[in-house]
Amino acid sequence: MKKLMLSIVALAATTGTLYAQSYTPDALRFSQTNFGSTSRFKAMGGAQIGVGGDMSSLGANPAGLGLFTKSEFSLTPEFNNMVGNASYLNRQTESTKDRLNLNHLGVVFYSPSYRMRGQDTQKGVVSTVFGIGYNRNNDFGAEFNYEGTNPTNSGADYFSELANSFGIERAGLAEMAYEGFIIDEDADGFFPVTKVNNQQAKNEVRSGSTSELTASAALNISNQVYVGASIGLVNVRYLNDSEFVESGVTTAVENTPYSFSLRQSQESTGSGYNARLGVIFRAADNLRIGATLQSPTWLFIQDNTTMVLDSRIASGQDAGTYTNQPVNYIFNYRLRTPLKGALGASYVVGGKALISADIDFVDYSSIRFDTDQGIEPETIMEENDIVRKSYKSAVNYRIGAEYKVNSLFSLRVGYGLNGSAIKGDTDYFSSNYYTGGLGYRVNNYYLDFAFQRVETNTDLAPYELADF
């Protein structure tokens, strides 16, 4: 079981926009993946790089397959309960979302090395192990609801900024706002016709995931050194449906009520590939040290965003309800995610307890956009510039422990921290993982349960004003 807690602090006119002004948040979203894991290591905080001998190695350190001594099959379903607590303009709201997923599926094939009679079976290549696995390594599911009274600005301020910067012909939202009498024009340019102290509310529902199908192989060399490699085929699907609603009074006709609703639907799909190399060294009977290097993932992303703005003016010469035709934005691009390196170690205490710890290094400022055939080069340059200015390197930590109560039952606990990728961030965008679980093993069968609570603070807003 996995429980996801999202604490959202939504600050008006700071970050986020009413339409896909930048694709860099999606690039970061698709780059922030966790190593795939079974329930056993999920209960141990995901600390697995220096352990091995578990199906988790398919999605983390492929060298861990070298510690298998027989063929195995594994299946890990997952139930997510996501709770979002939002604070917006001094008003608190809560939303929940439940989902059942397939988190992991894998099979490994163990092949001992052939030896002539009299040869040492514990020297050289002792065995070869092959594996195929599916891992869901990032879940985008979430729902945010927030509302409040805005005493300083309006969504119409944002529409007028778009119109003044790009003109209403190029900025589809600005044209819809102009046609719906939410903004107007004079000799100085476009301006909002709305007053402040308006009522604002937004609902946003996200779904989708990043998943990976891997083919791996590993060698057991003298029961001391284990090396492995894998190739991964990555699939990305991200859906975001939102509605922003505002109501208040206009300045055009004193105290004339108005309202507008902006509905946005985004679908991003993509596929790509990556590779991993890994090693585990048995430094002592009870101590293992591991390392893995994951290449960048090269993705091709297709983004399709549709939005429509409806407005209503209650009285005056502009009275009426105005429904615009949807505006559609399509953008296809190639994305290179960061290189990812990880180190880990595990230690067995008294034959009954296992302690494991990992550390990851990821440079998110190395994310890069590109397109085929030189399409929209200015957009690509702008996105890459935003990445360099906004993102930084991050360090992730994981630690876990397992205790064998007896030959049948094990207890597990763990903690993880994924560092923030945002420059200058101290309060938001990092994630804390609190985990626990138990395992039951008898003969050739095992059943593991895991509970994972994830806490993330995220800074959101319905729009961003350049002059605010």
Image: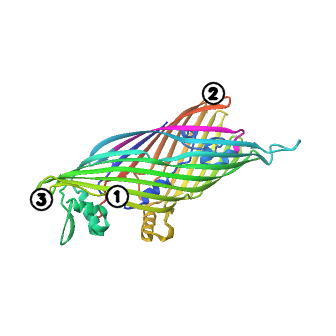
Q: Quadrant of residue 403?
A: top right
Residue at the far bottom: name it. Answer: 187
Q: Amino acid at mark 3?
A: Gln
Write the start and end of the magenta stretch as one range: 66-85
> Can you identify the residue that label 2 sits on?
408
Counting from the top left corner in percent of width and height, residue 456 is at 42, 46
Q: CA distance from mark 1 to mark 2?
A: 54 Å
Question: In this rendering, which labeled residue sits more in front, label 3 or label 1?
Answer: 3
Q: Which mark is residue 440?
A: none
Q: Nearer the viewer, residue 292 or 134?
A: 134
Q: CA distance from mark 2 to mark 3?
A: 79 Å
Asked if the stretch drawn in magenta spans residue 252, the answer is no
Numbered label tally: 3
> Can you identify the residue that label 3 sits on?
317
Neighbour tally class for label 1: few under 14, some 14-19, many 20 plus, Cα within 10 Å:
some
Q: Amino acid at mark 2?
A: Leu
Q: Quadrant of residue 437?
A: top right
Q: Residue at (32%, 45%) from the top-left corner?
A: 145
Q: Amino acid at mark 1?
A: Tyr
Q: Is residue 248 above or below residue 408?
A: below
Q: Which mark is residue 19?
A: 1
